Amino acid sequence: MNHSSYLKLFLAGSLIVSPLLPLHAQAEGSTTEEPPVVETVDVTAPLAPVVSTPLHTSKSIVIEGEAGTTALIGINSKVYTRVVTEAGTAQFNMSPQSVGKVISVSLRDAAGNVSETTQVVVAVDPTARPATPKIGTVNSTARQIVVTGTPGAKLTLQVGNATYTARYDAKGVYRRTTAVLPIGTVIRATTVDAKGATSLTRSTKVIKDGRAPMRPRVTQSVTTTATAITGTAEAYATVYAKIGTKTYKAPVTSTGKFAIKIPKQKLGQPIELYVVDGAGNKGGALKLGVQHALYNKFYRLPGQITLHKEVFDSEGDVRYAETFAPVFFGKPSKANMAFLVDIESDEGYLDMDTLRIQVGSKSYKVNIDPEEVEYMEYEDGSVGEWYIFEPDAKLIQFIKTNVRPQNRIIVTVEGSEGVVKWPLYAGEKRAFIESLSYAGY
């Protein structure tokens, strides 16, 4: 037998049987036994913490758990630590989080034991919801859904079984084009803010369209040269034009515009326009009369003043610093026609006394009555001076014969304080030609 190996086994067995007996005591043969020393190892993990439910407006959460442990807070891919106080609580401050954000919390004791994880999800603060959106009335002929809510925020729109997501514009409006929807279709809208907080849901249903459309409007008056009637009316409806015994029609576009083709009509011919929507509702009639071919070339101001659009603006102010143009006081006619001479200047009054119109070597002179000249001084220091007179037959004939688009026409106004000379612009030439024609010359 290998005694060396046997001794090793004997000693090993002795150690196994009495692992806590001090070796020096065995060697000295002492019979006094000392109590064994027991080392206790903490392997019990703390209980999972209790965590307050965070709202999307919360700036902190409260953690409850074993005193003296370290709370491990996992948020946004980072882990933060806080020590649980003797009172058994810890507070973690944070910026408000988005709705649905998951926050994980566990506890670690001094021995390194870690509890099970408690997860909380950021919820909506009911006191800080976005405003509930509004849905415009949607009837059985509507082709658009209009929702108003928080400018720039997201919204969820449910139309029947279909769901759409979008954003309100800067004015808080969202428009969605749609096909005609069946009566009773449910429409729901919810606003979602930047933190994911949702508003209360607004619901409505598609209703029957029982409301007659408004009367159409025309873009321009119908004249004897018109081959179409253009205007605006309820989108997707149909506009009808009744002229004598015939009726013409045209659809209205999604933008509310229409154009009905018609043959040229005689002056004064009555026209009746009306709208019928997709539900068969008929609106009130707009009654028109066919106007002179030049009708749309002129503004009609209060007081029965008719002015050519190329010389005057819609307020009746002249477009040029120096103006020579025809005007009508009442319905355009020979008897209602007058001529206007107007000068705007920064150099003081001219005190006009003579008007001269020159075409090549031909000219016509008009003496101005100083007593009938009008003056105006403006806030910026400039002055206005104008004279309105009825033209005689010779002046009418001179202008009718010589004023042409291709001719250069020079107007000269003399006064006691100086002379102003200018050429007629193309618009002023057309104003003379078309006004004389409109008056019946």
Image (cartoon, rainbow, N blue to C red):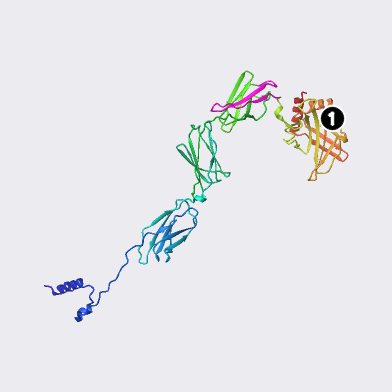
Residue 225 is left or right of residue 62, and the answer is right
Which residue in the rendered view is the most extreme toward the left? 1
Label 1 is placed on what type of residue?
Tyr
State whether the magenta stretch is mostly helix, strand or loop: loop
Q: Is residue 373 positioned above or below 243 on the image?
A: below
Q: Is residue 253 positioned above or below 31 on the image?
A: above
Q: What stretch is highlighted in magenta?
A: 264-291
Q: Residue 19: x, y in percent?
A: 22, 72
Of residues 132 and 325, the one nearer the viewer is 132
Q: Can residue 406 be seen in this view?
A: no
- Which quadrant of the rendered structure holds the N terminus? bottom left
Of residues 396 and 265, the one nearer the viewer is 265
Q: Residue 79: x, y in percent?
A: 42, 60
Residue at 64%, 23% (x, y): give it: 272
When asked about the image quadrant of residue 395, the answer is top right
| Magenta stretch contains residue 18 | no
| Magenta stretch contains residue 275 | yes
Residue 84 is left or right of residue 26, and the answer is right
Residue 99 is left or right of residue 116, and the answer is right
Q: Residue 73: x, y in percent?
A: 42, 59
Q: Can residue 51 be seen in this view?
A: yes
Residue at 61%, 19% (x, y): give it: 246
Q: Is residue 38 positioned above or below 258 on the image?
A: below
Q: Residue 423: x, y in percent?
A: 78, 35
When asked about the image quadrant of residue 288, the answer is top right
Of residues 64 and 352, the one nearer the viewer is 64
Residue at 84%, 30% (x, y): give it: 364
Residue that badge 1 annotates: 364
